[in-house]
Image: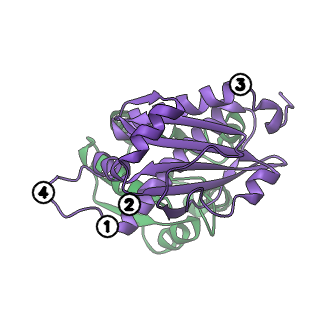
Amino acid sequence: MCSKKLPELLGSDAADLMAAAVTAVAAKSFFAVVERCDEPRFADLAKEADGWWVVSVRFTEGDDTGVVSCSFADDLAFALFDAFSGRDPFEPPADPTDLVDLLGEFSNMVGGTWLTRLANHQTFSLSSPQVQRATAAPQPSDADTRVLLTVNDRPLAVEIRIGARADRRTSPVGA
Amino acid sequence: MRILIADDSSMMRALIKRVVSLADVPVEDVLEAGNGAEALAILESREVQLLLTDINMPVMTGIELLRQLAADPRWRGLTRVVISTDGSSSRRDEVRGLDVLCYLEKPFSPEVMRDVLEEVARTARI
């Protein structure tokens, strides 16, 4: 059995594994296409966002704790809701409670899939997702791993913090 | 067949319910619980043939629920399927001794979920 601790596993492929995890979740449950993107393109796309939903899922794996945070541009959040629920465009818009639930589930699946691929030999537990609103786009931060993506051409930022950095994560970036 | 879905996400329960309705399985009723304790309360009061349960849930996790069910002979006839984001080999090993027929990893495509349901209904003869 592999005895490596989570911080030791957070090498350069942690970001690749996270991108793969988001791709799997988006494709299987949301019928969406994911691409990696760089900071300049992310900043360009972020300018068009009216607001952001920041979802944090805390995890415990063995002695290690951490947080996976997903920042969704507003229109991406609503598009994911429509894809998951099968909502007709002529129906009333997503109920905020259902939208929060859905974004939490997306982030939960992303975190779970990433942890499964990163350290398959260890069980983990995930806390209930914490969802917050932010007006500003997520900026480069002190995260251990930061992955910028587009989902159907809309911006999504995923950040991973381990240990003490996760404990300091008390409010969303840009909130 | 009466099905009980235990998951703390109402959106995920709705998705599973939708897939159940599209699968070729005889469904009489689909019940919902937001955690293991709610699921246990429903099982105490209603006859259920198939339990679809998440693992990471507040109040009572899916593992705690499955342990209680495995320890009580009253639930011997209940078919149990886990649907979880935790696809680790350790977690799969953990539930192997808890009378779980099938372990489905989230995210899943609706087609895979439908195939699993139809296979479960055939295997368990429900």
Kindly indicate whether the residues beneath marks 3 and 1 are on one polypeptide chain.
yes
* Residue A90: image tag: 4
Front residue of B31/B61: it is B61
Evaluate if marks 3 and 2 touch, with contact meaning CB atoms under 8 Å apart. Answer: no
Kindly indicate whether the residues beneath marks 2 and 4 are on one polypeptide chain.
yes
Dot 1, crowdedness within 10 Å: few (<14), some or many (≥20)? few
Residue annotated with mark 3: A12
Q: Secondary structure at mark 1?
A: loop
Counting labels gives 4
Please, what is the three-letter code of the amino acid marked with disc 4? Phe
Mark 3 → mark 1, Cα distance in angstroms: 39 Å
Residue annotated with mark 2: A99
Please, what is the three-letter code of the amino acid marked with disc 3? Ser
At a point 83% along the width and 28% down the height, the residue shown is A2
Please, what is the three-letter code of the amino acid marked with disc 1? Asp
- Which of discs 3 and 1 lies nearer the camera? The answer is 3
Q: Colour of chain A?
A: purple
Q: Chain of mark 3?
A: A
Mark 2 → mark 4, Cα distance in angstroms: 17 Å
